[in-house]
Image (tube, grey):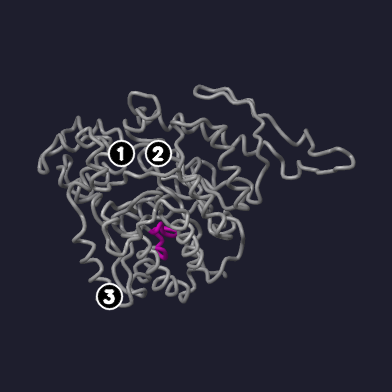
Amino acid sequence: MNKRQMHLCAFMQAQNCSNIPLSWRHPRARSDFLTPEYYQDLGALLEEGRFDLAFFDDRLCMPDTFDDDYKHAVENGVRCVKLDPMTVLTMMAAKTTKLGLGATYSTTYYEPFHVARLFGTLDLMSKGRAAWNIVTSVNDAEARNMGRASAMEHDERYDRADEFLDVVVGHWKSWDDDAIILDKSGNRFADPEKVHQLNHSGKYFSSRGPLTVPRSPQGSPVLIQAGQSGRGLQFCGKWAEMVFTIWPNLKIAQNKYRGIKEEVARNGRDPDAVKVAPLVYPVAAETKAQAEDEYALLNTLPRQIDGLVALSEVLNFDASKKGLDDTFTDAELAGIAGSQAMRDRVVAASGKPNPTLRDFLTFTGRDRVQNPLIGSGKDIADMMEEWFSTPACDGFVIGSAYVPGSLHNFVKFVVPELQKRGIFRKDYTGSTLREHLGISR
């Protein structure tokens, strides 16, 4: 196929709900999220839809920033269950053969050698389908679970992450592709000259090596990253091979897309080899009227507490301290230690230098399906093609209003429309995730 091809990634959660807290309340949502079959069935569905990959979001805590109490999250089902995503991915890997498999792992609370070995092993066991979604961890609740008093300062988290990546990627290069000999009669398992120590010693880490995991068919796992703040964008330009974004409209998306590609080029890398994918929430059905009915049902499910708990978690700011129409002070905005990119989006979308708490709820949509794509397969494909062809992206991260129905309807109604237009694959042409994405080793 000569025509530029769209990439699709499913945004997954190893928990009781999708990224949207209301999802567990949907009458058709599956409730067996503590079983391997739940995730294996989702993997089979995504592979049927020829998705490039599924990646799992994660945080290392139960949401307890709001009112300094985890009970709100537990009672209302706000992302309070968080299984280890790597274990879940092994369940999915066993029941799929092509789907890429990504997990979120923090550079703040783990050691580089451990992460290099973990993802290197997943890459081998999945025959070259692994991806690592790199995060730096944003809130104090995570820090307290990992033996620290509070989250690390924003820019320092990225400084540490830069060195973390130097070590991990260095370890992934420990084994040359042809290091293993397996000469039983000559007693030569591998060539020691083709297995290398890293001998890293830096500000944050020291790690000798070599890594104990040989290279996989795709060379190394694909690197996913979502940083869009100033320091996060620098990190993205240096390391990311797939960029996960959230943009409110086409014009902003076009400008931000160009900015990411320019940052990649400034780092001496090929911008075309870095795939940019904004998060969208399709609400698809056979007809637009049916999709609108489904969206109306979804709008009966949110509770205000959902948004307050989820917003407090991602911003690392206790929203119980403000009334809904109280404005954030300059000091409060500057002191947000969580998602600065989300803070900046709210300021831009509201048009207010000092938004209110209600503005944060409105423009982040933490309690509901935000900026949904509603319609028939053709309607949604039209919207996606406009963004893709402009271009404002290289593909999309598909979020779920509820599971598995949202993904099932997307595969049933939207994927065939994209395939019909020749902008999305009808079948896999490779076996590794790098081959799906068109990213070289």
Choose mark 3 or mark 1, whichever is in front.
3
User: Residue 426 colored magenta?
Assistant: no
Q: Is residue 364 left or right of residue 144?
A: left
Q: Earlier in the sequence, mark 3 or mark 1?
A: 3
At horizontal 13% and vertical 37% (from top left) the residue drawn is 322
Asked if the residues shown at circle 3 and circle 1 are in contact, with their CB atoms under 8 angstroms apart, the answer is no
Which amino acid is tagged 1?
Gln
Neighbourhood count class around disc 3 (C-alpha, 10 Å): few under 14, some 14–19, many 20 upward: some
Q: Quadrant of residue 167?
A: top right
Neighbourhood count class around disc 1 (C-alpha, 10 Å): few under 14, some 14–19, many 20 upward: many
Q: Using the image as rendered, state which of residue 60 and residue 351 is in the foreground.
A: 60
Residue 340: which disc? 1
At horizontal 39% and vertical 64% (from top left) the residue drawn is 407
Q: Earlier in the sequence, mark 3 or mark 2?
A: 2
Q: Is residue 168 left or right of residue 353?
A: right
Q: Is residue 97 left or right of residue 140?
A: right
Which amino acid is tagged 2?
Gly
Q: Using the image as rendered, state which of residue 365 and residue 271 is in the foreground.
A: 365
Which residue lies under the disc numbered 3?
Answer: 288
Answer whether residue 265 is visible to the viewer in this image. no
Q: Is residue 177 left or right of residue 72?
A: right
Magenta residues (range):
388-398
Q: Position of residue 40 (x, y in %)?
A: 49, 58
Residue 42 lies, with reference to residue 366, above or below; the image says below
Q: Position of residue 363 (x, y in %)?
A: 22, 50
